[in-house]
Amino acid sequence: MNDHKSRPSLIALFTDFGPRGIYTGQMEAVIAASGTGVPVIELCSDAPVFNPRASAYLLAGLAGEMPDNTLFVCVVDPGVGGDRRALSVRTGRHGFVGPDNGLLSQVVRHSDPCSIQMIDWIPTRLSDAFHGRDLFAPTAARLALGEKIPGTALDPTDIVGADWPMDLNEIIYADHYGNLLTGLRASQIEQDTLLEVKGQTLSYRRTFCEAQPGEAFWHADSIGLVEISVNGGRAEEVLGLKTGDSVVIKGLGPRAEGRGKLAE
C-alpha cells in the first residue's frame, strides 16, 4: 500500500483489547489526527487474549468477508517491547500491519499474491508497552496517506507461523451467544462429517432450526469457519469448552459411507 492507487478505503482494527477500556480509542485518535479521512471501524476488540495463534485463524476468516482495499491494524501482541518484528503485509485484496508473532500468518498463507515487509521505520514516540498506538496506528495512517514506509522485504516462509497448519483443529473464539468458532474451514469438510469435542459427538446441521432444542451440532458460520453451537443454549457452557480445546474429526457419518474425503 505504498502508492496512491492502493490507499485504503477502510481501516479496520483487530485487537484483543476488550470492548471496554482506554486502548482502542487511543489508536483511533492517532489515525484521526493524521488527517487521512479514511473511515475507521472496530472490527474486533475481543480476539483471543494473548493468543496470536488462535487470533490468526479468526483474522483470516474475517478478512475474507471485508470490502476490498481494507487496511487491517492488528494488535494481539503479548511480546510488545521485545525483539519480535513489526510487519506490513499486502495481499491481492487487503493490507495488514501487525506484529510478527504468527498473527498475520494465516492471511499470508491463504493469499496469492502476497508481499511482506519488516517495518524498519521507528516513530519519534515509541513506548515499550503500547505499539498499537505508537507504531501500528501511525504506520497505518502513513499508508492511508499514500506515504512510503521504510521496510525490508521478507519471504512468506520467514515469518512466525509460516509452518502452522492450514486448518486448526481447535476452538479459537467464543462469541456473545456462546457459539464456538474453530480454526477449521467449513469448505474443507464434508457435511456428513462427525466431530468430537470432550467425548461428545456432533453432527452437521445447516441451520439452528434444523437442530432440536438443546441439541449441540456443528455448522458453517458466516465467515466460512466450522462453528459449534447449541440450539437455544450457550455451547461453551453446555459442552464445557474454551479457546484452545481440541476438535477431533472422527470421520463420515453412516449416510456418507464411501463418499468424499476429509480435508487433510
Image (spheres, rainbow, N blue to C red):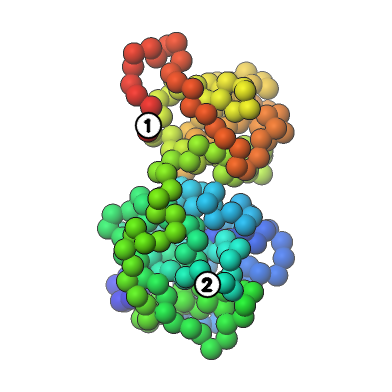
Rendered image quadrant of residue 162: bottom left
Residue depth check, mark 1 versus mark 2: number of the one nearer the observer = 2
User: Horizontally, is 5 left or right of 128 in the view?
Assistant: left
User: Horizontally, is 181 left or right of 114 in the view?
Assistant: right
- Total of numbered circles in the picture? 2
User: Horizontally, is 185 left or right of 129 in the view?
Assistant: left
Q: Amino acid at mark 1?
A: Ala
Q: Nearer the viewer, residue 20 or 257?
A: 257
x%, y% of residue 261? 34, 24
Alpha carbon distance from label 1 to label 2: 36 Å
Rendered image quadrant of residue 251: top left
Q: Amino acid at mark 2?
A: Asp
- The residue at 33%/53% (across/down) is 111
Please state, as top left, top right, bottom left or bottom right, where the C terminus lies in the image.
top left
Q: Nearer the viewer, residue 184 or 28?
A: 184
Task: Kindly give the residue lying farthest to the bottom in the view shown.
Answer: 124
Would you place residue 21 above or below residue 147 in this image?
above
x%, y% of residue 22? 70, 70
**Element under disc 1:** loop
Q: Is residue 115 visible?
A: yes
Q: Circle 2 sits on which residue?
A: 83
Would you place residue 219 above or below residue 106 in this image?
above
Would you place residue 88 above or below residue 164 in this image?
below
Q: Circle 1 sits on which residue?
A: 263
- The residue at 33%/67% (across/down) is 154
Q: Badge 1: how crowded within 10 Å, few (<14), some, or many (20+)?
A: few
Looking at the image, do the residues carrying marks 1 and 2 touch, with CB atoms under 8 Å apart? no
x%, y% of residue 179? 62, 37
- The residue at 54%/55% (across/down) is 52
Q: Badge 2: how crowded within 10 Å, few (<14), some, or many (20+)?
A: few
- The residue at 35%/50% (across/down) is 110
